[in-house]
Image: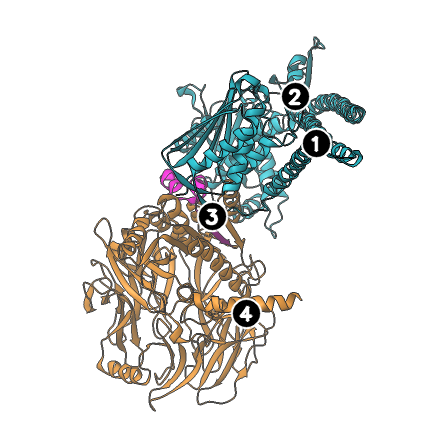
Chain colours: A orange, B cyan
Amino acid sequence: MMNGYKKFLWFALLPLWFACKPGKGKLIPVNDFFKSQDKVSFALSPNGKTLSYLKLTDKVQNIFIENTEGGESVQVTKLSEKGVGFYFWVSDNELIYYKDKQGPGRQSDVFIIDKSGNNQRQLNDNAKSRMRVLKDQLIDNKYLLVSSNKRDSTVFDVYRLNVRDGKMEMAARNPGNITDWITDSKGKLRLATSSDGVNETLLYRENENMAFTPILTNNFKTTLKPIAFAETRPHTIYAISSVNRDKNALVELDCNTGKETRVLFANDTLNVVDAQYSRNKKRMAFVVCETWKKEKFYLDDTVKAFYAKLDKLLPKTESRIIDRDKAENVFIVRTFTDKNPGSYYLYFADKGVIRKLSDFNSAIREEQMSEMKPISFISRDGLKINGYLTMPINRPTKNLPVVVLPHNGPGNRNTWGYNAEVQFLASRGYAVFQVNFRGSSGYGKEFMAAGFKQWGGKINNDINDGVNWLIKQHIANPKRIGIYGVGLGGYLALNSVYSSPGLYNCAASNSGVINLFSYLKAVPPFLKTNLQMYYTIIGNPDTEVDYMRQASPVFHSDKIDVPVFIAQSPKDQWVNSGEVIQFVKELKKKNVNVTYFEKDKESFPIPNEESRQHLYVALEQFLDVNLKKK
Amino acid sequence: MTSVKNSGYRKNFSLIVLFLILISVLFILSLFLAYNFSKKFIENEFVSEKVKVLESSIKPYNDFFQNKLPEVSYYNGYLDSATTSRFVDTLLLQYPFVSQVNFYDAEVGSTPVTNGLNTGHFSFGPKYIYQFGSLVPADSVKIFSKSKPGKFSRGDDFMTLGFKLISYIETLDTTKAPNADELFSNFSIVRSNKITYLNIPRFEDLKVYKQMMRTKLKTSPVYQQDMLSFFLDPYKIKIINTKPKLYETIRIEPLTYDPLDTSSDYSTTEITLPGPFSDYKLYFSSANSFVDKAVFEYFLPIALIVLFFYAILVLIAFLIYRNLNINHRMFKLQYDFVNNLTHEFKTPVSVIKIAGNNIKSAASLTEREQQMYGRILDEEADKLNGLMNKLLAFTQIENKAIQLNQDEINIVDFIESTIESHQLKYPDFNFTYEVNGFTSFVTDPVLLGSLFDNLAENAYKYSPVSHKFLHVTAKLIKGKIVFRFTDRGIGIPAPEINNIFKKFYRIQNQYNQNGSVGLGLAFCKELVNFMKGEITVKSKVNQGTEFKIVLPYND
């Protein structure tokens, strides 16, 4: 009886459904957007003969290999509880992998294994120390250069790890301020960066028997990122540098004098974010600049020809080479567009053939996705702010409900490409608005510095100016604007609803920072050197208590009066979950409509598909009620 | 007739009286019960409502305890004297029961401190101590500085909470994150008139604290801790009397307060305050007269409702009585009518019977006798016929069973023929007329004739012998025809004037002793209504009566 009634009701409502959504079929299920990939982390053995990847077996990631020429896949690791988090080849026959963390307080276990699956040995012995592999290459077929904090949890020394017997011998002792070690192409430790928290110093030595000498000191606002040693010239490195310029350029640096000897690529409007060195050709191949999207600028004609050939094989899509063999003949290529999460391909340069390996997310159909358009506007104080606007397909382009999506940070930015969160929101009929507010990376030093200590201040102004610009363009319905973000994006969302009352109808925060004091307190002991940098970017809690208090939502629960969605993992290290619960309680006492979602109850630290789906379903409902129905 | 009337009347009356007595008893009883109930209720309220007074009075304290104390932790140890001073200022404004705040800007470190607590390599000592409050003079805000140690009494709040902190860290289970309640209770001390609160560090920091107790850490970390001691004054709690009609006075008194001179004129009750105020209680007292007033105020609406229902019942009783009375009168009228009618029929019938007997028993009839008997029979038969016609026509009109004829009549001719027929019957009848504004109109001549005959008959009947006079005027006024029948008769007494158009109603007097059934004017009214007109009457006793008939003018 009841069933019959329900069936009838369903049929009765069916025409309504179609009437409400003209020209639109069923909603794409939430999970389709956030599906875990079937196969991830493709890599090639140095000789280019073996292809490896991670694949789920019973919800646990294991390494699989297969012949690049094709053939059966073979399971290398046979883990059943904690899977492989990360791995790489160190020789044609051996791989190193990191197991997923065993839980809070324990560090990742690191193993070496033969590609046949035999000969597995654990490399780190101390569960409390962290180990990082500096060079993915075996020296003398047995030594691996690693950095570890086993001597002192706050500093990383460099060790030569014998993968055959697991013995570690110290290669370089960290005086306490070295934050990074860089090797040359032969695996010799010749460069290091040290930091006093605010200033970064580049240190160099000619060979491993000498002591490191400082060559150049820069404030952290300035980039100086070594890319590779110039093998043809002594004492010379290639580096991405913004020393004495606003935008990053690719330069050649003399390590004895610390002077730039040559500028390989520089442009007043283009910011170099990456550069590729060809080991094979022993020269710089190209630089990558990011404006609204990443573009390659070739420094070598043969490289240019190579990519032209590849682009012909993979038309109308962006492509990135994610791994290559030593001979630079076999490549793993990843493609994507804003509407397509993309696929993995295997490319044989000598034969000019390409073979598809797997789709990033096969559930996504390109024609159902929305275009991500770059936009820009001028802020109230005259700064040009860039961003992206994704309009829902098959809908009028005026008077839309808008979800503003401030990016996480600091020193982060929104990039062009397939973004599951953006596409998910657009498919639900929202215009999705992303702003690269001041303080975002990729627009030069000045733009970055302009955002320092402007949390809840000029950063929010930039976002608000963007929203007002959208309203002026008649794209946004001023009564239906929501703001949602993750991490510091969530912080900006919560901050906006009390610092800009009236502009936003609701705010949603996913693992959002609600207290800047706690955020700084969370800088872990081994990042101690970074604390001064955080003080510069966020604010100094010793001297700027008032600003920090004003900017922290947790102190202002009394000023919030729009519906709020807060998703929080109780184990999030950047946020004190007790504070979040207290905050939610205070809002509830004030009769503010709060939706509190505790995520990752069981699956922390790696969120599984199910918990992610629950989160987005909850978010969808929250936005639906507050941006569409009211 | 009299016995019927009396017995029916008395029976109903006594029933109604009985009914009234019963509901009155019920009314008084329910008032009595309601009053007793109100009294009991208010007495109970007096004891139970104190919880609500306590809840609303202590609400600011709960708000302070649950929302404001945790705010200290939000600063994660970064509080300084300026910020604390501002924080305290808002506290003092918002929560008047906070009288003073001591702020211990403290450090947890691994080097031993002289003014503080040391255990293993864990030391906990204040860098500065400040006191804030409206009564604290500006020069004594800072009362301790690590560089210039002054007086620092070991028994105070800092030590107490410090010991609690150390014993908590001692027993801390580092494998499992502690829950918020556990942390709160271990980082605060609630004592009489005082709450001390230490900002709750992160779990990671607590783990380091624990390590520091066992081993000397190379990094010699220093952690900032803020401790705040809030001095509370229970007498400053703002009492919110949620039941001002119940409690005359509410005071805060020490727990031991128990006045000897509690006279029986006062009702009192008390409830202990929670948390740091537990040495105090709320003391409620009200004069008995005050309580009685509350009882009465509670009772009054109940009494009004009871009264209202009582009034409705009385009203219903009255209406039943009135309807019975009217029905009784109707019954009496119809009874009279039957009597009259019988009488009316009896006279002509007996005259006819006598005339018939005389004719039958006479051997021969003289010419004069035959003429006489013929006339008598003819007249009496006419009388009977007239009576029956009248009764029949009335019933028909009343039931709307006849059709209205529409004939044009000449009004002068019509009135003259009426006068002629009446003067033929009554030669002493002075019947005059006057017509103005029209000569003819459309109506039913039979009905109009009945109307004229009835009114003329009445005018003749109810006039003294010397004044048998009737003047009829017919005028066209504002599109309506108005007839006025003016006589110089005996008139109608004012109290009766509303009854004369009722069926079977007759004014008791000498003129209608014979040949009247009390139908004439009721019949006229029905006729006029049927012709869509109106009839009204004006009269003065012994001077005359004027009937006014307004009829629609159909040309």
Determine which quarter of the picture holds residue B275: top right
Of the numbered discs 1 and 2, the one sitting upstream in the chain is 1
The answer to whether marks 1 and 4 sit on the same chain is no
Residue B160: x, y in percent? 59, 31
Query: Mark 3 against mark 1, which lies toward the viewer?
Result: 1
Tag 2, which chain?
A: B
Alpha carbon separation for disc pair 1 and 4: 106 Å
**Cβ–Cβ below 8 Å for labels 1 and 2?**
no
Alpha carbon separation for disc pair 3 and 2: 130 Å
Q: Can residue A339 be seen here?
A: yes
Can you tell which mark lies on residue B369?
Answer: 1
Which residue matches tag 4?
Answer: A11
Tag 1, which chain?
A: B
Which residue matches tag 2?
Answer: B508
Alpha carbon separation for disc pair 3 and 4: 71 Å
Of the numbered discs 3 and 1, the one sitting upstream in the chain is 3
Residue A176: x, y in percent? 40, 54
Element at label 2: loop
Q: Give the range drawn in magenta.
A: A540-568
Can you tell which mark lies on residue B219?
Answer: 3
In depth, the one of B486 and B98 nearer the eye is B486
The answer to whether marks 4 and 2 sit on the same chain is no
Of the numbered discs 3 and 2, the one sitting upstream in the chain is 3
